[in-house]
Amino acid sequence: MRTVLIALGVGLRGTPLAHGRPTVYLHRGLSHRAITFTRPAHLAFKTLIWLSTGIKVREWVAVHRKHHAHTDTADDPHSPAVSGWKTVQVRNLAMYRAAAHDRRNVERYAKDLAPTAADRWLFDRSWLGLLTGLAILCLAFGWQVGLLAGVVHVNYYLAGSAAVNAIGHHFGRRRYDNSATNLQWLAIVTAGEGLHNNHHAAPTSAKLAHRWYEIDPGWLVIKPLIWARLAQLRLTEIRIAATHHRAAA
């Protein structure tokens, strides 16, 4: 039992921090340019993403930008309005991979993220990153705890990401006039991503909480980075996009 508890702690990195790096770096930072990072912070985030998920940043950014460009239409890579929320929850990874491996998507939506030498030799080797991260866990905590922690972490991240795309466009409140929804419980377990209606209304805002009672754990990661001058905000206020005005109460 003690081994399982240790593995859960290591694997989740203290829920909801399993989603902390992707939401801060990949989503709010690279995809929407709501945050810019210093070189050391950029390298640290990119390395942690590589070790914990194996994600190729250009592909992730391209898929997400396409989602915003074609939200809940036939061209959306993962729309519950088109495929049904249950299908997206179960097949989100397959949907992501199909869009990510389409070179046309990457060339169109992530042309500002040209591959570097480090990408070609290191960060684009997804399985090397995942296996290296798993090896670090096994060396630090023993192979049994390390393997269990790795499995828990990956499945937690995949399930949470799928829930944002599926549940976060089907159930919940719509404060603003867009098809995404707000679910505070989902925001708690996905480092703020469950405040999805807020995000679609103000995609250039680094802060996803728009009311004092809304909780955005990702913002608690961003603030220390700003204080330490490792990151800088694009906007200091929440700016609602003109096409996403407030919905009627």
Image (cartoon, rainbow, N blue to C red):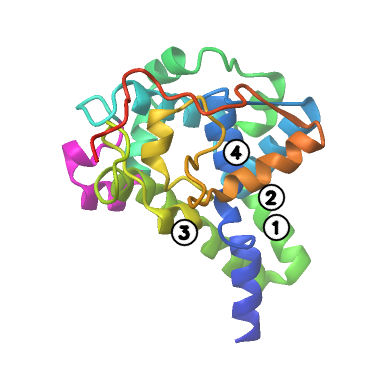
Q: Earlier in the sequence, mark 4 or mark 3?
A: 4
Q: CA distance from mark 4 to mark 3?
A: 20 Å
Q: CA distance from mark 4 to mark 2?
A: 23 Å
Residue, far bottom: 1
- Residue 49: x, y in percent? 62, 42
Q: Earlier in the sequence, mark 3 or mark 2?
A: 2
Q: CA distance from mark 1 to mark 4?
A: 25 Å
Query: Above or below — where is 43 with respect to 212?
Result: above
Residue at 46% x, 45% y: name it: 193
Q: Which quadrant holds the C terminus?
A: top left
Residue, far front: 249
Range shown magenta: 77-92
Occupied quadrant, residue 235:
top right
Q: Amino acid at mark 4?
A: Val
Q: CA distance from mark 3 to mark 1?
A: 18 Å
Residue at 31% x, 19% y: name it: 243
User: Which residue is denoted by mark 2 in the rendering?
Assistant: 132
Nearest to the eye among marks 3 and 2: give it: 3
Q: CA distance from mark 1 to mark 2?
A: 5 Å
- Assess whether residue 86 is covered by the magenta stretch: yes
User: Which residue is denoted by mark 4 in the rendering?
Assistant: 24
The local secondary structure at tag 4 comes to helix
User: Which residue is denoted by mark 3 in the rendering?
Assistant: 155
User: Which residue is denoted by mark 1 in the rendering?
Assistant: 135
